[in-house]
Amino acid sequence: MIPSVPRVWREIRYRYRLIGCKCTDCGAVYFPPRPLCIKCGSRKMKELKLSEDGVLINYTIIHYASREFKYQTPFIVGVVKLREGVKVLAQIVDVDLSEIKEGIEVEAVFRKLREQGEQGIIEYGLKFRPKIKPK
Ligand SMILES: [Zn+2]
């Protein structure tokens, strides 16, 4: 499923800066931002810059991917829980497949997501990598 170019442009601001939103009525936080709170139905949403670090809560290793992602296989896709409690699904990079494990601390990085066929549009987006702990 390839998103249309207009959609990419619409989302790019959020993808680059990890901006979510917070419901001013009940405090629920969402990423990507949405106009309506699914918890309380409020439309009073405020933009919220999310923290760029979190914990990897689970992951899967992708061995077979569609053509546009094939050059990257095998790769890791994981669910990262940010400090605000929001879960983000993203590729996990800069880690050995043998070293990946649940519970590690990760931080956001912005990398090439894919190239779109003949048009050669390069899409960038959010990925996460393990935080290197100071020794
Ligand atoms: Zn709400």
Image (spheres, rainbow, N blue to C red):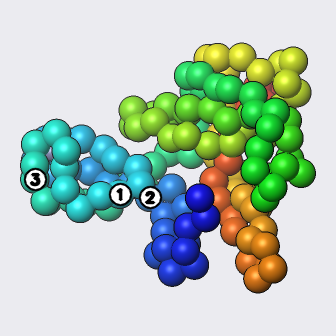
- The structure residue drawn at horizontal position 72% and vertical position 38%, both measured from the top left corner, is 92
Depth order, front residue of 39/21: 39
Residue tagged 3: 42
From mark 2 to mark 1, how far is it between C-alphas? 7 Å
Label 3 is placed on what type of residue? Ser
Residue tagged 1: 33
From mark 1 to mark 3, how far is it between C-alphas? 13 Å
Instruction: Using the rendered image of the protein, determine whether residue 16 is visible from the camera's viewpoint.
Output: no
Name the secondary structure under disc 3: loop
Position of residue 84 measured from the top left corner of the image (x, y, whole percent) = 39, 37
Q: Mark 1 or mark 3: name the one nearer the start of the chain.
A: 1
* Mark 1 surroundings: few (<14), some (14-19) or many (≥20) residues within 10 A: some
Residue tagged 2: 19
Name the secondary structure under disc 2: strand
Judge from the rendering whether residue 90 lies leftward or rightward of residue 135; answer left or right.
Answer: left
Label 2 CB, ligand 1: below 8 Å? Answer: no
Instruction: Using the rendered image of the protein, determine whether residue 90 is visible from the camera's viewpoint.
Output: yes
Name the secondary structure under disc 1: loop
Look at the numbered discs 2 and 1 and tell me whether their residues touch, using CB distance below 8 Å: yes
* Mark 3 surroundings: few (<14), some (14-19) or many (≥20) residues within 10 A: some
